[in-house]
Amino acid sequence: MSKLIFPLLFLLTGILTGCGIDEEKEYQMQEFSFTDQNGQSFGSEDLKGKIWVADFIFTNCDTVCPPMTASMAALQDEMKTKGIEIQFVSFSADPEIDTPEKLKEFVKKFNGDEKNWHLVTGYTQSEIEMFAREEFQTLIQKPESADQVIHSTSFYVIDQYGRITNSFGFQKSHFEEIVQEAGKLQ
């Protein structure tokens, strides 16, 4: 009987240890520090321990960015209604054009609450293209012959450890899924 107790205690200790949250767990997304719509530094240090939703937009977009930004503002309202504490981050896909002032003006058109929504810029075109590819496994490309940027239209849910847990379409029909995903992470 005593021969079985030690292996069982060892196994039980291992199981119980694995159930807790590892506070020392390394943040998964590469460190970044950009400039938000208020001209303030904002980055991975501000997001550690927080759940966030991210997307890629640009202010002179002729097609999908205005509806995406309107959806982000509506999703922000939905999260408030559901009592989910979450951050929103919109990365500019056209940083050479999108100054903090332009991003601030852009978000105001959609009545976004800037307390927990940061629109960021302050990097080169090649830096955001590499960041999107490496961290979000998505394409951003600004053709030399056009003023429009090719980019993802997804909303990405990122957990407290900087891991992308899922991506969704930006349309309101996906809000329930996004809310459920964020709710599971809280």
Image (tube, helix red, strand yellow):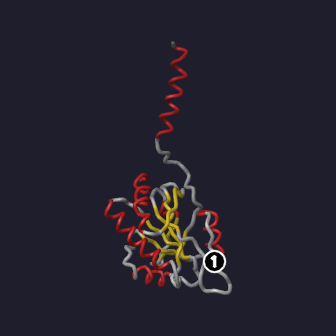
Mark 1 burial class by Cα count in 10 Å: few <14, some 14-19, many 20+:
some
Among the 4 quarters of the image, the one containing residue 116: bottom left
* Residue 108 rendering spot, x and y as whole percentages: 39, 81
* Residue 163 rendering spot, x and y as whole percentages: 54, 56
Q: Amino acid at mark 1?
A: Gln
Residue extending furthest toward the top: 1
Q: Is residue 163 left or right of residue 78?
A: right
Nearer to the camera, 162 or 26? 162
* Residue 122 rendering spot, x and y as whole percentages: 56, 77
In the image, residue 109 above or below residue 138: below
Q: Residue at x 54, y 49 (%)?
A: 25
* Residue 50 rendering spot, x and y as whole percentages: 45, 58
Nearer to the camera, 16 or 69? 69
Among the 4 quarters of the image, the one containing residue 136: bottom right
Element class at badge 1: helix
Q: Residue at x 35, y 68 (%)?
A: 77
Q: Residue at x 64, y 76 (%)?
A: 141
Which residue matches tag 1? 125
Residue extending furthest toward the front: 173
Q: Is residue 129 left or right of residue 50?
A: right
Q: Residue at x 50, y 45 (%)?
A: 22
How many labels were placed on the picture?
Answer: 1
